[in-house]
Amino acid sequence: MAPKPFSRRDFLRSALGAGVVITAGSAGQVVIAATNHAEQVPAKYALIIDTTKCVGCGACREACTIRNNLPEETSYIHILAKGEGADRWFLPVQCQHCAEPPCARVCPTRATYRRDDGVVLINEKLCVGCKYCEVACPYQARTFDEERGVVDKCWLCLDRVQAGDMPACVDACVLGARLFGRQDDPNSEVAQLIASGQAKPLHPEFDTQPSILYYIM
Amino acid sequence: MEQTAWGWLVVIYLFLGGLGAGAFLSAAFFELSGWRYKRDFCPTVLTGATISGPVVALGSVLLILDLGAGKMEPWRIFYLFTNFSSVMTWGIWLLCLFIPLAMFYGLLELVEVEPFAKGIIWARFPRLLRNLRPTRRWVAIVGSVLAVGVAIYTGVLISVVGPAVPFWSVRMLPFLPIPMMPVLFLISALSTGMALTFDLAATIAVPHIHEVMGSMALVHIILIGLENILIGLLLIMALSQGGAAAESAQMIMYGPLRLTFWVGVVLIGLIYPFVVHAYAIGAGRHSLWSGIGSGVGIVLAGLFLRYLIVTAGIPAYL
């Protein structure tokens, strides 16, 4: 007997079944991603910001604006003023290059991704400008470029870093409040600061494992 | 500080997604319960079936208009289907399945009143017209599953941003790790859908609608009561959580958004419809104007509720 031809009804039935499995599977994936951090390649670079030295002069912010050719008054760095009177201190915030980036998880197009060296980047060719990542970033580190219609953020001046230079904000900090280096090299200054436990992530309760760390008194 | 990344377009999109899904569920409820066949003409099913597809489609158009590069280079929209760890991707898939099915449902209802629609189906699928009732039944069942998905998804979309916007990820109860937004958005979707298809459409088309009036008003008054409880819980939970979530709740209750909340949601969407429906249960019918009043009130309140929630989404303190 000839095998039964695969009818349209069979096709619909199996397509429906596959749909349910895919949906359930991806739902499971999200739950797993949310509860159990997958094995991530450790970040290669670290930027440690020493808030005991920062006076909020805004040189890093300005350098970022110029270096990235951004419109005036926009920058990938925003500086928050904390405390009152004599206890006033400053907290510069930019993309934290998280090992578990919430922005990448919510991005419907996979435009945001984490490189193997830990740097989180945006593929502007894939970005549709839905701003979901901007909403989902707990560090408010993303800006929307109205002109190009894509989301934009700190990219750690990767071109300069790969050429052996420092990111523009690090070069610009006259007080030496920004320390940049290889955290995979145990002899580097950043690796030693991290090992000593003095450099800590900002708001560890966000649970995103940033590679930008802070030295806060 | 208000939430600024998403504005009115996203607010209306979330609202229309809920309204369309709710209208579909309302129609499907009449279909599957058999109430639809108690009379020759059922305005609730007709309105719900015909309007749900176009309403959700319009919402999706607004979502696309809110895009940046995706609007300038529309082929980028196809990338939206790719990342299954993103709730937005799930939503896009749901919309793409729901909208055509809902439109088809509308066509199946239009054959009753519109010879043109009958012609379209008759020419291509004569068998379908002979099996109209079982076809409608299956479309209502599958569509209901998708509609619940669409309604819940609009809430899940904002609740999964987790620590970034504490107000959006408020739990239902301290010991219950279920986010409030998906549940609230589902109940609000059902309520606005019923307001549109029943309070508005049915009372206008059949002012002396008697048979099902009492039980429908009862269903609706339960929904309104539930919505009231959920909104109250949301605000209490947000206030007790402190930080940015508490600031969001304060902004809504006695901050810059207070007028929209107390008048636009509480008065016209909860109190007035509650009174009118309680009266309708007693009297056994809606008067024309109370039906229109509560219908318009609930639908507008659904829009204002989403506006409040989106606008008051204050980012976590750094």
Image (cartoon, rainbow, N blue to C red):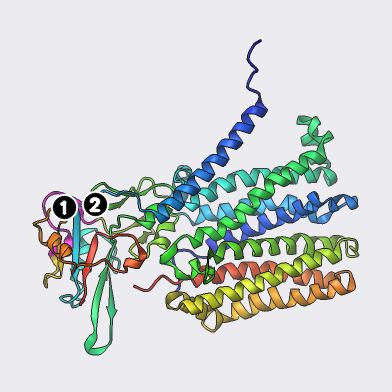
Label pair 2/1, CB-CB below 8 angstroms: yes
Q: Residue furthest left?
A: A187
Q: Which residues are magenta?
A: A156-171
Decide whether residue A157 is among the magenta residues.
yes
Callout 1: chain: A
Q: Going by the picture, which residue comes out furthest to the top?
A: A1
Instruction: List x then y, in percent, for residue A10.
Output: 64, 28
The three-letter amino acid code for the residue at tag 1 is: Asp
Residue A143, image quadrant: bottom left
Residue B80 is left or right of residue B116, and the answer is left
Which chain is mark 2 on?
A
Q: Is residue B216 above or below residue B121?
A: below
| Of residues B194 and B134, the one drawn nearer to the viewer in this rendering | B134
Q: Residue B197: x and y, percent?
A: 76, 59
Q: Give whichever of B62, A106 is nearer the camera.
A: A106
Residue B271 forms part of the magenta stretch: no
Looking at the figure, which quarter contains the C terminus of chain B?
A: bottom left
Which amino acid is tagged 2? Pro
Distance between the Cα atoms at labels 2 and 1?
8 Å
Query: In the figure, is residue B305 to the left or right of B133?
Result: left
Query: Toward the viewer: A114 or A21?
Result: A21
Q: Residue at x 85, y 66 (%)?
A: B214
Residue located beneath label 2 in the image: A42
Judge if badges 2 and 1 mark residues of a common chain: yes
- Within 10 Å of disc 2 (Cα), the crowding (few <14, some 14-19, many 20+) is few
Q: Which mark is residue A184?
A: 1
Residue B248 seen anywhere in this rendered image of the structure: yes
Q: Residue at x 67, y 51 (%)?
A: B54
Q: Earlier in the sequence, mark 2 or mark 1?
A: 2
